[in-house]
Amino acid sequence: MKTFRSSISGALGMLLYFTLLVAPAAAQDNPKLSDAEVASVAVIANQIDIDQAQLALKKSKNEDVLQFAQTMINDHQAVMKQATDLVQKLGVTPQENAVGKQLQTDAEKTSKKLRSLSGSTFDKAYVDNEVAYHKAVISAVEDLLIPESENEELRNLLQNIVPALNAHLEHAQMLQKQLTTK
């Protein structure tokens, strides 16, 4: 059975990583991921956004940023629950892989950078990261995780979260413009 910043430079690094990973795949060979690996990447990607949002709840004083962060926590926890329920139903144990490990490494760097910031500098860096992160995740879901998923239910779950990810991206971009004009 087949299975699934903070600093602009960090977010762009993550985006570059996914671009390098996915672009050649579109041209020729996709990295091969089992359904267990796809599930692992999905869980990791959601947990990263939850962790970043929890940091924003602790550090930000901006009401719009706080509301956005709470939305990220609520929505990504709901997706994680759906993914967890599905892998339990399918009897799949998420399996560690290079994509997930790279996500975690990049997220640790981002968190470290974000923790060093405060005030409006933190808010801008957090939102800039959310824009770049959601772009990277959308690309990875559409170009890597969905095509690599053999299980129809897993593929459907991934396809069904893309509109929410796009809505998150649009919300983050709106907030980014708002913070830039202040």
Image: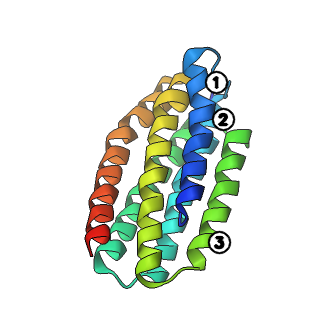
- Label 1 to label 3, Cα distance in Å? 35 Å
Name the residue tied to disc 1.
Answer: 2
| Residue in the foreground of this view, choosing between 50 and 127 | 127
In the image, what residue type sits under mark 1? Lys
20, above or below 94, in the image: above
| Residue 118 located left or right of residue 88 | left
- Residue at image point 58% right, 42% down: 16
- Label 2 to label 3, Cα distance in Å? 29 Å
The image quarter containing residue 177 is bottom left
- Residue at image point 35% right, 51% down: 169
Residue 63 percent location from the top left of the image: 29, 80
Please count the marks in the image: 3
| Residue in the foreground of this view, choosing between 122 and 105 | 122
Name the residue tied to disc 2.
Answer: 36
| Residue 45 located left or right of residue 106 | left
- Residue at image point 52% right, 53% down: 46
In the image, what residue type sits under mark 2? Ala
In the image, what residue type sits under mark 3? Lys
Q: Quadrant of the C terminus?
A: bottom left
Residue 180 percent location from the top left of the image: 31, 68
Q: Are marks 1 and 3 in contact (CB under 8 Å)?
A: no
Neighbor class of circle 1 (other Cα within 10 Å; few <14, some 14-19, many 20+) is some
Q: Quadrant of the N terminus?
A: top right
Residue 53 percent location from the top left of the image: 47, 68
Q: Are marks 2 and 3 in contact (CB under 8 Å)?
A: no
| Residue 74 located left or right of residue 5 | left
Question: Would residue 94 be visible to someone looking at this image?
Answer: no
- Label 1 to label 2, Cα distance in Å? 7 Å
| Of pointers 1 and 2, the one earlier in the residue sequence | 1
